[in-house]
Image: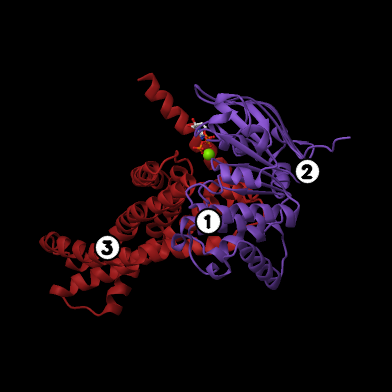
Amino acid sequence: MTLYLKNIFNDAGNVTQFTLRFFKELFKPPFQFREFIRQCFVVGYKTLPLISITGFIMGLVLTIQSRPTLLKFGAESWLPSMVSLSLIREIAPVVTALICAGKIASGIGAELGSMKVTEQIDAMEVSAINPYKYLVVTRILATTLMVPLLVIYADFIGIYGGYVGYNIHGSMTLFRYFSDVLEHLEFLDFFPAVIKTFFFGFFIGLIGSYKGFNASNGTASVGIAANEAVVAASLSVFIIDMMAVQLTDLFF
Amino acid sequence: MKAKPIIAISNLYKSFGKNEVLKGINLTVNDGENLVILGRSGSGKSVTIKCLVGLVQADKGKIQIFDEEVTTLNNDDLNYIRMSIGFMFQNGALYDSMSVRQNLTFTLKHHTQNLAEEEIEIKIIEALESVGLAEAIDKMPAELSGGMKKRIALARAIIIKPKIILYDEPTSGLDTITSREISELILSVQKKYKTSSIIITHDMACAKMTGNRILILKEGQINAEGTYVELEKSKDEWVHSFFI
Ligand SMILES: Nc1ncnc2c1ncn2[C@@H]1O[C@H](COP(=O)(O)OP(=O)(O)OP(=O)(O)O)[C@@H](O)[C@H]1O
Ligand SMILES: [Mg+2]
């Protein structure tokens, strides 16, 4: 039990150090711009199809499921705005972040883990290349930037899914649907939700990199690193979400 | 008067937890010399040269490279020393997300800033030709055989024109003919670039060909030292066992 606690504190200390190092290296030139762009592309490319499908289905299903309830209250006209609100505030950010946790955090964990195991990270170090800067900083920045963009994309796809779902029983043009949505949307529905996605992205990149960078030797540890990265990143998404909701509740 | 050694390690200790790996290593590498280190698997040969470049932190002892005490250097100064060291890893450690060309370019660009594209290209071709693999330039590491990987790793080590090259088992896992080619390569690099090297190996043919001097590592200490011919004649049973 004490050993267990000791491990937790040890881990927490190491993660903190790892995070501090990110901010320290972030502002030290030279900036690895090309690797950063490449990583942004990788993040987007890997998840775009998945996010398109899930985003669409979320909007569609949510509309179909909510219609009967709203019909009971005679509030069917609220359907578009209600669905898009839940999408923008909660569902699209969390679902997108979870997909990224599954796809990106594990990918980073496995990639860096295998680089560690096959001494590629050591090889960078002896070539006087800062592996943390080249591998970790670029990846964390890429996820921090890309996850919010992917979430906004998922918002749109989700709303479109809602439109398709609405038109199974009703009939409304796409233009009217969207203007109806936008009309009921306030800045405060959108803004906090976007802010928290930056944190989702940051922690997805951070956890994936941490697990991979600190993989122990041996090929088995690559799998372990990837697996632990997914678990920890998904968990962190929920925890950040909870904190974000409480904070927004407090301040607005 | 004897010239100053390029590398001098004295009284080096390193343990991993309870596993005491190095227990007082002393060695020197002279200018232009190829020093071979022999030793059983797990005797700490790789750890020794990793301490040398600061990949592994030594517990105790002095490590001097070009008269600089490596163990107390800050990161920037350490990197400066690393710039003149080529390191060939036991399993190549090629960046497997990059092609052969990118592997070399990446290393070179970080080493020498502001090189023109043509200069880089010339240096890459030169390095690849000196390991006899110019045709592999656009291959990915996964498409290379074990021996080819080792040769590319060697090309990556020499492309920065290092003064010191550390070879970690350059011939392990290769057939005798390819091994001999690699040994010849090591010799020609020594002549061409006037490098000083440490060569870790289990391959006695390689040790015989490349080594100006041989050390044998046993239980974390240097147990025997001499030229191939001297050690071959050794009466010590344990030393002799390497030469059968
Ligand atoms: N990073 C590490 N963490 C813990 N133990 C290590 C580490 N690196 C090496 N060791 C231990 O140090 C000892 C020596 O390892 P080293 O890799 O130097 O052996 P070697 O002489 O190079 O053997 P081989 O010929 O098989 O490569 C081994 O017992 C190994 O378990
Ligand atoms: Mg070794």
- As helix, strand or loop, the secondary structure at mark 3 comes to helix
The chain under label 1 reads B
Say few, some or many: other residues with alpha carbon within 10 Å of mark 1 (under 14 / 14 to 19 / 20 or more).
Answer: some
Q: Which chain is purple?
A: B
Q: Is residue B220 above or below residue A122?
A: above
Q: Is residue A83 above or below residue A124?
A: below
Residue under numbered circle 1: B178
Which is nearer the N-term, disc 2 or disc 1?
2
Q: Measuring 40% from the left and 51% from the top, which residue is drawn there? A: A105
Q: Measuring 34% from the left and 64% from the top, which residue is drawn there? A: A154
Residue under numbered circle 2: B31
- As helix, strand or loop, the secondary structure at mark 1 comes to helix
- As helix, strand or loop, the secondary structure at mark 2 comes to loop
Q: Nearer the viewer, mark 2 or mark 1?
A: 1
Q: Which mark is residue A54?
A: 3
- Residue B83 in picture, x, y percent from top left: 70, 50
Chain A as rendered: colour: red
> A142 or B83: which is nearer to us?
B83
The answer to whether residue B212 is left or right of residue B149 is right
Distance between mark 1 and mark 3 Cα atoms: 53 Å
Q: Measuring 56% from the left and 35% from the top, which residue is drawn there? A: B243
- Residue B40 in picture, x, y percent from top left: 52, 32
Where on the picture, by quarter, is residue A175? bottom left
